[in-house]
Structure formats: C-alpha cells, structure tokens
Image (spheres, helix red, strand yellow):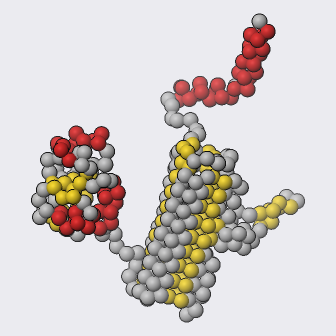
C-alpha cells in the first residue's frame, strides 16, 4: 500500500487536520486492529469508547467525537464516505491485464480503442467494439457485435455474449455471464420448444457486477441495467428485467423475467422477486424477502421467519400448518359471542 503524509491525505479528502501533519500513513485498518502508521475511522459514536485503546496513528471522525480522540485526527462530516474515498486513494489492486497478451485471439474485424489491455487466452470476436482504456482479463469471451465503453474493466473468465452493450467505467468480476439466453420455452404435447432470445442486455455507466452473476438477454425487448447500479455475487437476473439507476442488489438475489425495479432501491441478500410486475423507486427489501406482488410505495418491506431454536420453530410450523382450522374456530367463537 502506498504511503502518504497525513497533511496531504487531509487535503485530498477535504478533511480538517488535527495533530501532526507529518505523520506518514502506510495503511488502513479497523479500530481494534490498527497499529502505528495506520489510519482508521469511527463512523458510529456507539464505538466511541474504543478511541481510548486504539493504536492507530490517525483516526477519521466527526467533530462531535473529536474531544474523545487522543491521536491525530481528520475531522469530516461523513467518516464512512471518507473511508471509501481514502481506500480508493490507497488501493493497490492490480489491473486485470496489461498490454495485449500474445495468446489473446482478437478478430481483425474487432475495433479496439486506445490503451486497451487484453489478458491471456481471451477471445474477442468480429464486430466487437472496445472503448479507450478498456481492460479485458484472462480467459474472457467478448461475442460478436458486443460493445464495451471506455474505462470498463473485466476480471478473468467473464463472458459477454453477442450484441451486449456495456457502458463506461463499469467493473465486472470473474465468472459473470452477461447475455446468455433467457429461460423461454413453449410447451407442446409433452415437449418444451425453445424460444430464441432475440433481445440483448444494455448496461449503463458506472455499473459494478459481482462474481458469478448472470444477466440474461431479453426475449424480444432488452434486459436493462441503469447507470450506477451495483450488483453483488451470484445473482440471477432473468430476461427483460429492468433495474433503475443507482439501485443496489445484494448477493444471491433471484429476479424473475419482465420485472421492473425502480431507482435507488436496495434489495437484500437471497431475496426472490416475482416477474411481470413493478417495484417503485426507493424501496428497501430486507434479506431473504419473497416479493410476490408489486410494490407501489417507497419504504422498507420484509418477509420470512427469523431463525429460532428448532423446538420453537417446530411449534411455529405446526401452527402455520393449522392456521386455516384455527381461523375457522375463531370465526365460530366470534359468531357465538356476537349472538350472546
């Protein structure tokens, strides 16, 4: 990790410096593990007591927490956001590829912008178009007529099918597949008849997609992912799904076909969302949510039963299985009480 003077770091982060600006910061760590030379952050005043024992050379915090700090500090309004920006400044993650590997197979009919890098054994087919500063990791496949915008990075073994369009400054992690066939079949006399998927996938700018996620191409219309969307690992996004800008999707989420999700939504991990319906802007679905009906108003929505000791869960399950009978008995009692 690169080293930087605390005063220089404060200037780049637009933070107010308290203490020795000549301290050299060599890394970032959590409050409980930070050592001399490292910087940490306090984003929740509930952990204020940890300031007394923290060994970091500097701490990012708010003005309200500053009186409890006994080391150098950077005072900001939002310590967690500042941590994110600080991590970007000190990031040492290598590029997925450098230059063009001799083993890469690139069609002469593909169009590559300036400073494009392509890793070993990657394949770029005819008609594909890569913007300036695109990085394609080892083992990637870029199909015919696919388009990838400037500054986008693909890690190893990403598959981009034909005619998929990806915007600028996106990041796609290893093993992700974009543009595979949606799950479209017609049933005829005991047999499934495949419906060719004639749409594609359109991904906006500044989209990040985690490892081993799949985004299917549309059947007729396109699957669309808006600008600024972030998608975690191992998600399934079916054909013709539309996700509005700046929505966040946590790991393991399954979205059925022709679903439309609004802007600035947050979908909790392992949630399952039915297709052919809409979810409004600014909706939060908590983890393991099962969304079976449209959501028309912003807010926080939850479903599922939290973990219980097995004995308690068995009783709960037994009650649920008998809920219809219990309801009938309750109505009978209500009728009797009403007559009395």
The part of the image, by quadrant, that contains residue 180 is: bottom right
The residue located at (57%, 43%) in the rendering is 301
- Decide if residue 55 is on the left or right side of residue 211: left
Give the number of callouts: 0
Please say whether residue 261 is visible from this viewpoint.
yes
- Decide if residue 337 is on the left or right side of residue 296: right
- In the image, residue 280 above or below residue 130: above
Measured as percent of width and height from the top left, residue 299 is found at 55, 45
- In the image, residue 108 above or below residue 58: below
Q: Which of 92 and 44 is in front in this view?
A: 44
- In the image, residue 163 above or below residue 204: below
- Decide if residue 299 is on the left or right side of residue 84: right
The residue located at (18%, 58%) in the rendering is 17
Measured as percent of width and height from the top left, residue 222 is found at 67, 69
Please say whether residue 329 is visible from this viewpoint.
no
The residue located at (64%, 67%) in the rendering is 223
* Outermost residue toward the bottom in this view: 108
- Can you say which quadrant of the picture contains the C terminus? top right
- In the image, residue 98 above or below residue 69: below
Measured as percent of width and height from the top left, residue 267 is found at 54, 51
The residue located at (52%, 56%) in the rendering is 264
- Can you say which quadrant of the picture contains the N terminus? bottom left
* Outermost residue toward the top in this view: 340
Measured as percent of width and height from the top left, residue 288 is found at 55, 45
């Amino acid at each position: 990790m690169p080293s930087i003077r605390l005063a220089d770091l404060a200037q780049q982060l637009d933070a107010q410096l308290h203490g020795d600006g000549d301290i050299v910061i060599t890394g970032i760590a959590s409050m409980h593990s930070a050592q001399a030379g490292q910087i940490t952050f306090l984003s929740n005043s509930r952990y204020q007591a940890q300031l007394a024992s923290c060994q970091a050379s500097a701490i990012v915090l708010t003005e309200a927490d500053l009186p409890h700090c006994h080391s150098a500090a950077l005072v900001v309004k939002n310590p967690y956001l500042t941590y994110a920006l600080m991590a970007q400044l000190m990031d040492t993650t290598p590029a997925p590829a450098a230059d063009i590997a001799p083993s890469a197979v690139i069609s002469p009919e593909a169009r590559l912008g300036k400073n494009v890098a392509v890793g070993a054994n990657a394949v770029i087919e005819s008609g594909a178009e890569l913007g300036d500063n695109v990085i394609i990791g080892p083992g990637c496949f870029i199909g015919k007529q696919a388009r990838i915008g400037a500054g986008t990075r693909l890690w190893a073994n990403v598959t981009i099918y034909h005619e998929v369009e990806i915007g600028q400054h996106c990041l796609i992690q290893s093993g992700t597949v974009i543009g595979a066939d949606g799950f479209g079949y017609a049933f005829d006399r005991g047999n499934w008849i495949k419906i060719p998927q004639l749409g594609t996938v359109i991904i906006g700018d500044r989209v990040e997609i985690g490892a081993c996620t799949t985004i299917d191409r549309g059947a007729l219309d396109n699957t669309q992912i808006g600008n600024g969307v972030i998608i975690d690992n191992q998600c399934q996004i079916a054909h013709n799904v539309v996700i509005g800008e700046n929505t966040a999707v946590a790991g393991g989420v399954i979205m059925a076909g022709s679903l439309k999700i609004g802007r600035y939504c947050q979908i909790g991990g392992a949630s399952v969302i039915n297709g052919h319906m809409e979810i409004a802007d600014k909706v939060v679905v908590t983890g393991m949510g099962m969304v079976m009906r449209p959501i028309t108003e912003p807010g926080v929505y939850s479903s599922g039963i939290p973990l219980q000791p097995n004995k308690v869960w068995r009783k709960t399950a037994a009650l649920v299985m008998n809920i219809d009978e219990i309801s009938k008995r309750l109505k009978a009692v209500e009728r009797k009480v009403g007559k009395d």
